[in-house]
Image (tube, helix red, strand yellow):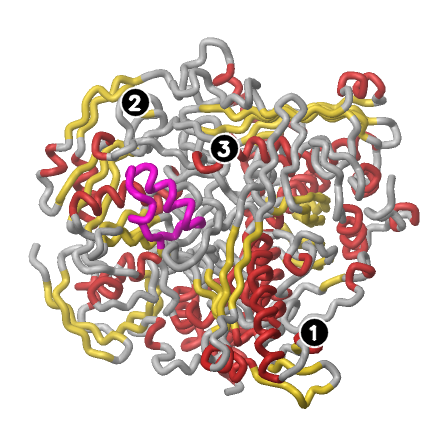
Amino acid sequence: MSYRLSPIDTQYFAPDHEGDDFTVIGSVVTRSDALGHVTGRTEFFEDVRPSGLLHLKMHRSTRHHARLAGVDSSAALAVPGVVRVLTGADIPNNLYTPLKLINVEPDDEPILAVDKVRYLGEPIVAVVAETEAAALAGAAAVRVDYVDLPPVFDVEEALADGAPIVNEYHGKNYFTYEGHHCRRVRLGDVDAGFAEADHVFEWRYQSSPIEQAPVETTGCTVVPQPDGRLRIHSDTQACFFTLDNTALILESDFNKLRIVGGTVGGGFGGKVDVVVEPVACVAAMVTGRPVKFVYGRHEEMQVSSPRAAERIYIKDGVLADGRIVARQVTAYIDAGAYSRHTPYGTTKAAAHFPGPYTIPNVRIDCHCVYTNRTPSSAMRGFGVTIGDFALESQMDRIARELGMDPLRLRLKNAYRDGDMKAHRKRAEGTALIEVMQKAAELVGHELPDEYRRMSSLEAR
Amino acid sequence: MTRLRGRGYAAVNYPTGMNLGGDPSQALIHATTTGTFVVSLSSVDLGQGLKTVVAQCAAETLGLPFTNILVDTADTDTGPHCMGTFASRGTHRVGNAVIMAATEARAIMLDVAAEELEVDAADLETDGTGYIQVRGAEAKRIHITDLALAAHFTHGRTISGRGVFMKEKSEVVPETGEMDPDSCQAHACTVAEVEVDDETGVVEVLRMYSVYEIGRALHPAMATQQVEGGAWMGMSHALFEATEPYYPVRDHGPADFSEYLMPAAGDIPEQVSVLLERPAPTGPYGAKGIGEMTANAPIPAIANAIFDACGVRLDHMPFTPERVLRALDSLRGQDLSAHG
Amino acid sequence: MASKIVTLRVNDREEEFLARPGTTLLGALRDTLGLTAAKRGCAQGACGSCNVLVDGKPVPSCLVPVETVDGAAVATLEGVAPTGDLDEVQAAFLEDFATQCGFCTPGMIMTAEALLAENPDPTRAEVVEAISGNVCRCTGYEPIVNAILDAASRRRSA
C-alpha cells in the first residue's frame, strides 16, 4: 500500500482540536466508487445503451457574427439514416435560461440560432440519425447562407463607442448590475489612499480562455418511458438544475422529466450549463425513440463554454513599510456572446477582490463584457482563479519594487479575524498567515520572530 | 544556453459555497430492516469523492461503522433536491444536510433502543462498532441489526431522518457591493521552484510546496488526491492551457488533446503538501470546500518563480515558451518581433 | 461497402458478429458486444481511455477498424478479474487512491497490464513512458505512477 497522504498539522489551531474524538471522520476508508472504477463496471451515462438509439449532431455556425439569410436542411434529410432535423422553430421555448431559477435571467441565448449567429460554432440545426456517422454526414450537409457582420473580440474594444453590438438582448456589450455598468465594490476613499501613499503601482494582467477538458465529454441519452415521461441519463453536475431548466425550455411539466446521473467522468465546471439535454429531449419527443447527444472532443474544446478570459488592472497605493493603503481593481471578464454563468462569476470576482488582504480603501469595478466568441461559464474557481494570478503577481511585484521579502509583505497585509473586508463582511476563520508561516518552514524561508509570532486570531 | 532557477510564492483564500448563498441541498436517510442506512441524495460525484465523504459523515453522526452506510444518488425521482456540484459546495452543503438527517435518525434509533433495552435514551451511547449500549454498563447493549428489525417488526417505527442545508441568499447593495458572499474561506500558500531554459523558453516546474488550510480533512487520502490533482491543474493552466492561444485573436484554437497541451506524467513536479485544519463552525465536522482553490496558488507562484529565475514578468497566461522568449528578448533590448 | 463478419477472441471468449463498414474496435466492443469498460474520451487516439490489448499490445481501440483485427485476441478490463478477485494492478489502483472520476482508469489499467507483462520490474521512467498516451484530468498522475510501480512490486512478490 503506498497512497499519498499529506501530513495534517493541527498545532496552529490546537484549541480547535480539543475534544476531537472521531471514529470515521479523518480515517482513510476505501473510496466507495473505487471497486467499480478498477473493474470497469462503474456506469457512466454513455454506458447506458438503449435499443433503437438515435444519434444527434449539430450543424454549427462557420462565422463569428452573421445574420442568417437562409437555412436549407434538404440535403441533410436526404442523407441515408437521417431521421429528423430540428431548427429553432422546433424548440417549444427556444431560450436558454440557466440562471432563471436564481432570479438572474438574461434570456439572451437561443437553443438553436434563428436570426443571427454570434460566435463560431453556435448551433443552428440539429440532425438526428440512426448512426453517429449519418448524423455527422447530415450535419455537414446543411446549407446556411450568412450575411457577415463585423465581429468584436477584445473586451475593451467591445465597450468602446461604435463597437458592433454582439447581443441585441442587452443593447450594449455589457451586463447591467442594478443600473450599473459593472459590479462594483466600494470601501473608504481610494483617491485619498493614493494621495497618502509613498508609492503608486499599476499593472495589467491578462488570461486566455481555458477548457475544463474532462476526459468524458458533455452528453446525455434521453429514453422515452412507457408512462410518457423522459428518463435523461446525463453527466450534468447538477441534476435538478438540469431538470428544471430543461422543463422550462420544453414547456413541459417538471415531473415529466427524470434525471439519472451522479457518476461523472470529470466536470471542473464544464457540465453545469444545461446545453445538451433540452435539444436531445425534443428529438426524443418528436421521434419517440431514445436519443444520444454527446459532444465530440472538438466541440468540448472549442464550443463548450470555457473559463472566461480576463483582463485585470490593479492599481495600488503602498506605504514605504509595505502596507497597502488603497487598491483599485478594474476587471473585464469576457462572457463571449451570451451570459451563461458569467454575470454570476463576475459578481464572484468582485466579492473576491482585493484578495485576502486588509486594505482600508478599495474600489472594484468588474465588467461582464460580451464579445463574439464561445460563451464562457463555470470552471473550477471561475471569478477567482485569474484574479489570484493578478493579485499574487501584483504582490510579488510590489515586494520587488520595495526590496521586501515577498512573504513578509503578504504577512503584513494579511487579513485576520475581525477585519472588515471590502464587501463589508467581517472576516472569520482566517488562516492566511498560518499557511504562509508553514510554507516558509517547509522551504526553509527564514522569517523574523515578529512574523513567526503573527496570528490570524490576534487583532491587527 | 543557461538553465536558470527561481522560486516564487503565492497565498490565496477561497470561498466555500455558491456566491451569495441561496443554494440548498437536501438529504434523506432511512434504516433498512437489517440496519443498513440508506442516504438518498440527488447530488453528483464528479470524482472528488462526495459519495464517500457523505457516507463518512452519516456513519460518524449515527455512531455506526462506515460499512453500514449506502449512498443512493443521483436520481431526481428518488433523491431530494441538491443545487449541484460546483462552487466548492458539495462536501459542505451535502455533508451538512446528511449530518442533519442522520442526527434526526440517530435520535429515533436511540429512542427505539431505549424501549428495547428498557432504559433511558439519554443513557445510551454508540462507539462506532455497530452496538448501541448503556453508558457505563456496556453489557447492556443491542446491535443495530437487531434494533432495526425490532423497530420495524415489533415497534412499527421507521428509523429515518431529513436534512437540509441552506445559507440564506444575500442581496448585493449595488452602490457599495456590500454582501455576504460565502460560508467560510479556505486558504493556501504555494512555493514553486522552476527552471527556465533561456534558449528555448521552456519552463520546468521542479517542485511545488503547498500548505492548505481546509477546515478539516474528512478523508485525508482523498483530500490529498484533491489538493495535489488541483495543483497539477494549476501548473497546467500556468504553462500550457488556452483554447485561444493568441487571445483576443480567435485563430489557432486547439481541437483535441494533441493540440491542447497539458503536462503528462513525465512533466510533473515533485509535490510536498501539508494540510492545516482550522475547523469552520458552519462546516460538516468543520470541513471547508477545497475543490476549486487548489488550482489557484500555483499559477502566480510559477509566474513569480519565473521572474525570480530570469527577470521576466509574465502578465499574460499561459506562460508559453514563446512568451518567455519574447520577454527575455525585450529584457535584453533586442525585441526580435520588431524584425519580422 | 458491405458489412463483414468479424471473429475476435475477447477475454478468452470466441465472438462472431457482423460489422458495418467503419466500425471501430471500440464501437464493436461497446455497442455490439456490450463491453463498456473501454471509454470514448476523444475518438482520436489521443487520450488512451479506450486502450485495450490486441494480441497483448495496448492499442487505442477507437482508431482500429475492427475488420483489421479479425481473428485477434482482445483483452479488456472486464476480463482481468471476471470473478471479482482483483489482480495486482487493480488492487494497487484501488488501495493507492489512483482513481478519482474513474473515466481514464480502464485505459490506464490495461496500459499498465501490457507494460508489466513485458517488463515486470519497470523503472519510474518506464512507467511514465508507458502511460504517456493516457490523459487523466483529476489526479496529476503521481498516484497512478505510484500504483503501477506498487502493482509491479506486488506481482513480483506474489
Residue for point 84% across, 31% down: A323
Q: Is residue A255 above or below residue C16?
A: above
Same subunit, tags 1 and 2 = no
Chain letter of disc 3? A
For the question of whether residue A388 can be seen, the reply is yes
Mark toward the start of the polypeptide (3 vs 2): 2
Q: Is residue A213 above or below residue A28?
A: above
Which residue position is annotated with label 2?
A: A116
Question: Disc 1 on helix, strand or loop?
Answer: helix
Given the image, on which type of amino acid does mark 3 rest?
A: Thr
Which residue position is annotated with label 3?
A: A342
Whether residue A410 sits left or right of residue A102 in the image: it is right
In the rendered image, residue A324, in percent from the top left (x then y), is placed at 80, 29
Which mark is nearer the camera, 1 or 3? 1
Q: Are marks 1 and 3 in contact (CB under 8 Å)?
A: no
Whether residue B54 sits left or right of residue A314 in the image: it is left
Question: Disc 3 on helix, strand or loop?
Answer: helix
* Mark 1–mark 3 distance (CA, rounded to whole Å): 51 Å
Identity of the residue furthest to the bottom in this view: B139
Question: Disc 2 on helix, strand or loop?
Answer: strand
Given the image, on which type of amino acid does mark 1 rest?
A: Ala
Q: Is residue A54 above or below residue C72?
A: above
The quadrant of the rendering that contains the N terminus of chain A is: bottom right
In the rendered image, residue B291, in percent from the top left (x then y), is placed at 58, 52
Q: Which mark is residue A285?
A: none
Which residue position is annotated with label 1?
A: B122
Per the rendered image, the range of residues in magenta is A234-259
Q: Is residue A239 magenta?
A: yes
